Amino acid sequence: MKGAFEADAFVNAARELLNTNDPVGAERILAPVIHQFKADAPVQHLMGQIKKAQGQLAEAERYFRAAIAHDLKAGQYYNELGVILQARGAYEEAIKVFRAASALLPSMLMVRVSIVRCLISLGDLTEAEREAREYIAIAPGPESWTLLGTVQRAQERHQDALITAETALRYGPTLRGLRYNHATALDKVGRGVEALAVFEKLARQELDTPDLALHYVRALYTEGRRQDAETVAEQAVQHWPQVTALHSTLSRIRWLRGEGERSVRANEAAIQARPNDLSLRLACADALHRGGHNAKALNVLDEALKLAPDTPALLTAAGVVLDELDRPLDGLRVLRRVAELAPSPAAKRNLLSTLLRAGQPDEVLRIVNELRIEQPHEQYLIACATTAMRMLDHPEYRVWCDYERFVRTYEIPPPHGFFTTEAFNAGLAALLRTQHKTNAHPLDQHLPNGSQTGRSLLALDEPVIKHFLAAMDIAVRDYVGRLRDNDPVGARRTKNSRYTGLWSVRLGDGGYQPNHVHDRGWISSAYFVSIMPGERPKDPRAGWLKFGEANRAPAKCGPEKFVEPHAGMLVLFPSYIWHGTVPFEGAERLSMAFDVAPT
């Protein structure tokens, strides 16, 4: 009896230490007696909590499972196990465990939030919405309505998400979190002036979170108050020097103002104050690389690697920058080191472009074949393989890249309700120009002298978008119907297909799209809405589409096909074919693009 009493005392002491945020001390006290409680569910659960508090998730999972094994009706134990499974990405099992917790403890409503978040992570947005609406039916309030808004944003139903945010706000009109959510929802539907008013009022009360600071800065910049945006960003990085997103935003603002390499001076000052913060160094290098200042970016990465020479993220960044500096062999050496330190599909994938530039196409084909076992339809992998085939003069190359057969152009007739294609394009252009003002944030753009809308236009509730998609359907069906079952594109053909994305690109004088592919696509497109060329272009192909040239092209692997665009033309092609644009010369080149995927 005495031994049991003493053991209980250890358990109680461990629980008290955990409650005072001392999990290390709690484990030190509980560990010597834990073997006496193998069948005691509360003690096993306590040790699981201690391990969880120390970040030892595998051990925590083991103890939570032991607690459940000895008490099958304790809903809290299931919930905590579900949290661990969710944290390590085992979403399907986590959902099953959370459902058990909910059945045992229906009043524990936060379990429903966890289920919805797991479903979002799995991409099952229909089921996530059903669960969120069930939560609203059980407990209508700000939490449940906010959860539904999260699902709707994931579905890119931003107008619905705004209505949901307004509903949540009615339950607590003075709550800062709900006001913030309402402002972000306004911003997503292009009501930037209203969003800024809310952000500004919140910030004047208290600029209390880096997320509020970031959204406030972006809203100020969008509405043309660029000096105010920079001032707030400067204040924010002083208050939260560890938040890299704020540093990146401030650097981008200053770069757009023409500061060049000096745009990162606030980031550099933060590094001086926090020299061991590698994320600050990585953010600094990324901002410099994005601005084309690769030599200085490499210097920043070299200094960081002196502190942490085997950090995969730093090495990966250095490998990319070395390749950009036309040092592919040095870049390859660094990227191979990453693959040794942290073997993963991503590390192998990161080798491909540099291997091509280093003249090693055979290894590219070997790696692609390995990776496509798990991801047979990833278009970037196929694109790298086709470039390797081209370098090797492989006979399969023309099977995949038969440009005359796979790149097809269509003249789109006026949609129903429009007398001419010109009239339709005029209405579409007016809508798209508005979207480029509200939906193509300057701080996010990667296109030289151009902009791309930042979210899919498929969910935009505009009649002209519906007319556009209907007009495209005939051409898409014709293209798919011409594919052969035994060719690389036609092999994926099914009875039905769907649009998986819709966006717009607007180029000004000197603007261009770098060569790229659409990783998750099948058939990609470009539809030209408005083209206002210069009178005497220096390049006769200015603004033309080009095909076949990789993003960092190996020697003797330039473009193989060009298409001269004009308003009303649609171009369809496989998503794995490299494509980009010759720099445009003129006032405007406005286009739409979408991807099609088999269902």
Image (cartoon, rainbow, N blue to C red):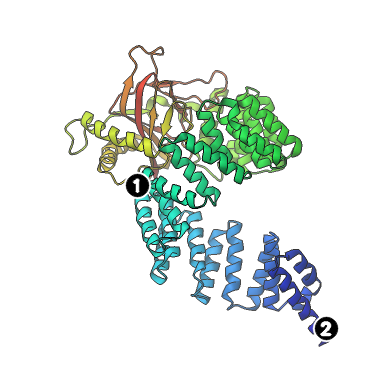
Quadrant showing the N terminus: bottom right
Drawn side of residue 97 relative to residue 545, left or right = right
Q: Residues within 10 Å of mark 1 (few under 14, many from 20)?
A: some
The residue type indicated by label 1 comes to: Ala
Q: Locate residue 132, reporting x and y percent.
A: 42, 63
The answer to whether residue 180 of the structure is visible from this angle is yes
Q: Secondary structure at mark 1?
A: loop
Kindly identify the residue that appears in the image at 22 percent across and 30 percent down.
Answer: 421
Vertical order, 309 against 158 (above or below): above
Q: Name the image quarter holding residue 482.
A: top left
Return the x and y of residue 110 as percentages of the image width and height.
Answer: 51, 67
**Element type at mark 2:** helix
Please report the residue visible at 42 percent of the width from the left and 42 percent of the height from the top: 492
Residue type for callout 2 = Gly
User: Residue 262 appears at what percent x and percent y?
Assistant: 60, 27
Image x and y of residue 302, in percent? 71, 31
Q: Provide the residue designation for mark 1.
A: 459
- Point out which mark residue 3 bears: 2
Q: Residues within 10 Å of mark 2 (few under 14, many from 20)?
A: few
Question: Quick one: label 2 or label 1, which is nearer the N terminus?
Answer: 2
Q: Is residue 369 left or right of residue 144?
A: right
Along the line of sight, the residue nearer the viewer: 375 or 341: 341
Q: Is residue 366 visible?
A: no
